[in-house]
Amino acid sequence: MRWLTLTVLLLATMTTPATAAPAVGRAHEPGNGPERNQVAAVDPPLHATARGDNWPDANPGYPRRTLLRGYPEDPADRAIKLGLAPYHALAPRLNDLQRRSDRVSVEVVGRSTAGRDLYLVTLTAPESPAETRRQDAWRDKIENDPTAAARDIFLRTGYKAPVWINANIHGDEWEGTDGALRVLEDLAFDPAARDFLRRHRVYVNLTANPDGRVAGTRANGHGFDLNRDFVTSSQPESRAMRDVIQRIQPLLVLDEHGYVANTLIEPTTPPHGQNYDFDLYIRHGYAGGLRMEDAVRALGHPEAATPEIPFRDYEPGVWDGWAPIYTAQYSMYHGAVSYTIEIPMRVNRTDYTTQPVTELRRRSAINTDVVEATIRSALAYVGEHRSAMVDNQIEMFRRGLAGEPQRAVPDGFVPGFGPEDRYTTEFPRAYVIPVGDGQRSGQAAARLVDHLVAHDVRVKRADRPFTLAGRSYPAGSYVVDLHQPKRALANVMLESGRDISDQVPVMYDISGWSHRLLWGASVDVVRDGPLTVRGREVAAASPTGSVDVPAGRDLALALADGKDVSAVNDLLARGIGLLRQDDGTIVVPASARSAAEEVSDRYGARFTPAVPGGAPLRRPVVAGAVAADELKALRDMGFDVRPVSTAVLDNGFDLSGVDVLLVSSGLRYDQLGAPAKAAVDGFLARGGVVTRGATGVRFNADAGVLPVRAVAGREDANGVVSVVDEAGAVGHSFVYAPYWFTDLGPGVGARQRYQGLVAGHWATRPDGSGGSAAAAGQAAVVAGTSPRGARAVLFGTEPLFRDHPKGLYWQVADAIYRTTAP
């Protein structure tokens, strides 16, 4: 009885370890670091399709069995070499478990970018439909009526505590899947687990990234790091995980990763997200982490003898809990005590190809043991502290609904908690997303509302005009009342953020994001006061398209959003002759009114009467040496993008049909062979160029495109910045390893200049260079014509970063149109 044996072992090893010496630092692997500039995106390969289909049964209780479709055997699956389960073996294994155990239910909660099924396994004691409905009602009560939930004695004794195990989110960190399989197979049959499953549900996302698992890549099939995508939800795998978190409302979450020597178990170092009710997290978070540490030590593997807990062992910023982009940090906004687990023995990257198979399998076996131990000890902890953890979740939602301020967490609340851990905020009363004349982009407002709703943030649409904080708003405007259960999630998405440059020396990954400032919508902050707005909660935003143009008149479309660009590219793809005016406005002929009405409805574009003038615009063909996120954003806007790189150009890629060369990743002019370099030189005499970042800066200098001097900001600088455009309008942009441009030569002008950092981490280098103060007033984006004749736009900002700053996409599109020859 492995379940019973290990539980007894865990109870016997509940000791408090001696405080470890602080770590000076850890090797960072943020996932969108150097490779963002060095590896150009390519179209992903296709894989063999599955046979048959999924046939779920109709049982509204548990078990809910699904006959999972089979996938062809793939001998190239990278897990096989490690002695781990290949993806094609998972469905037969799960089908067999469902046949043999009434505790196991499997459902397909989505598909990967390449079309592979995403399996959610639920382990629980059998439930009648009535019992399942009662569990659903209690879960809803915890979130939406927490005061009543706290008084409900039947809930307190009968609610099944949900635990979520997320495995293999990084495809080349395999063993989370295999360790979870061990546990779920044991829970499925061990008589000692029966009582546990009467009071708990265990949910296992068996492989969050099946495409990466098969290919042995960190990223998914479209090149995205899924553990950076939660508040953006650009990928189907991320959306599936988001929806699972909302649906099951877990008390505890484990996200199984690799690889950090000795094993890493959160809680994190500061900075901790300032929107958390941190007192409700850290007590169980730290105690549960210590329990997992004991379990890993008890395995007896020397390679995992001294697990590391960043909160206790690392310096601030080395392994922070600031950004809501990660599984664990995002899950906390839904009421979970959550952990990232990093197992110890590296088996990926160069080790995968250089180590003997026997050594790789030895390491994988140790890693699988560690995964199993962390899961079992976490389940044991929840079993012992179930009532207190349910109370914590109820209290988090109660504070949100009541609009109470965060509680002060005193020094020593848990061992080691001090001033460096104290990050708090003051929640505003509400946010207002106006409609009509008060909105920069109708599509952006609708997109933001739909995104908030998809993340379980409550949004109300006003039935009539109203006034808040001295401002008047028309009927149909949207209100996000921060008196709601998940107010912390609403606020972390809508607030500006915070400049933490002087609070920690380094950050693990990005430190700034803001859907309010970067998604293109106008959003007002209501700090305090009464909120008496009549309306109803919305499930989806209202349509935004309109054609306010008299019959027989040409139509104008001012680019303000990526959806406007989609409308333009749709019209161009139909062969409709469009004009582009000097200010970037697109003119559609009156004869194409019906097509304009179609794209207005499809993309939410707003057409107004046009003034005469403009140069012909044709649909550009873009050769893109770009990162994966940029490729997705460009194609989402409807651009015809042909992926290129140094190797692709050297292999004879034909530039003759290309209008614009977009360079941001994986292309070095100085490394091209003579024929490819001659082809690029010929292109630069007639085509357009758009560049971004370090690779773009180098290409510009080596190929002699625009006469400018590029200055690099600090390499790990990132965040939301304020900018001013050439007309003097103030806005916002995003930076990641920023650049600015000085010594602008003849014919080169600044299109955008930096003002300052709004939120993020942008410090100076030790020598005092590279900081945000040095960038203030300098050109962030420049445009001009090269001596060879190429029209060019150079970006020192990151307008397409990780498919997040959607309000900036039109800037890149405008640059492509600007540099396309008539």
Image (spheres, rainbow, N blue to C red):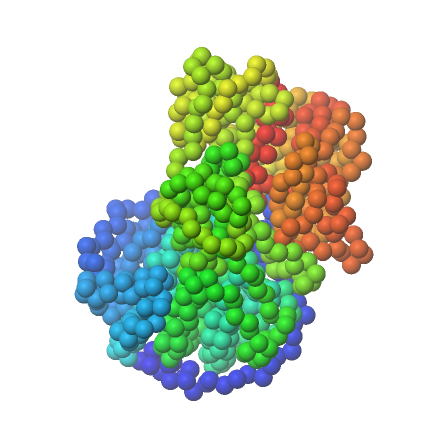
Q: How many marks?
A: 0
Residue drawn at (50%, 85%) of the image: 15
Q: Quadrant of the C terminus?
A: top right
Q: Residue at x 73, y 30 (%)?
A: 749
Depth check, front residue: 407 or 223: 407
Measured along the vertical axis of the image, is residue 716 above or below residue 618?
below
Q: As displayed, is residue 60 above or below residue 195?
A: above
The answer to whether 771 appears left or right of 293 in the picture is: right
Q: Is residue 553 above or below residue 469?
A: above
Q: Quadrant of residue 669?
A: top right
- Residue 458, compared with residue 706, is above or below; it is below
The N terminus, quarter of image = bottom left
Which percent across, then down, holds residue 27?
63, 63
Give me the residue at 60% from left, 69% from top: 422
Residue 5, horizontal then vertical, whole percent: 35, 82
**Is residue 667 visible in the rendered structure shown here?**
no
Q: Position of residue 330 (x, y in %)?
A: 48, 59
Q: Residue 718 at x, y = what percent?
A: 64, 51
On screen, residue 418 versus residue 175, left or right, reads right
Asked which quadrant contains residue 92, the reply is bottom left
Task: Write the residue at 52% across / 51% down.
Answer: 526
Q: Is residue 426 visible?
A: yes
In the picture, measured across the screen, residue 818 lies left or right of residue 709, that is left
Front in this rendered view, residue 134 or 146: 146
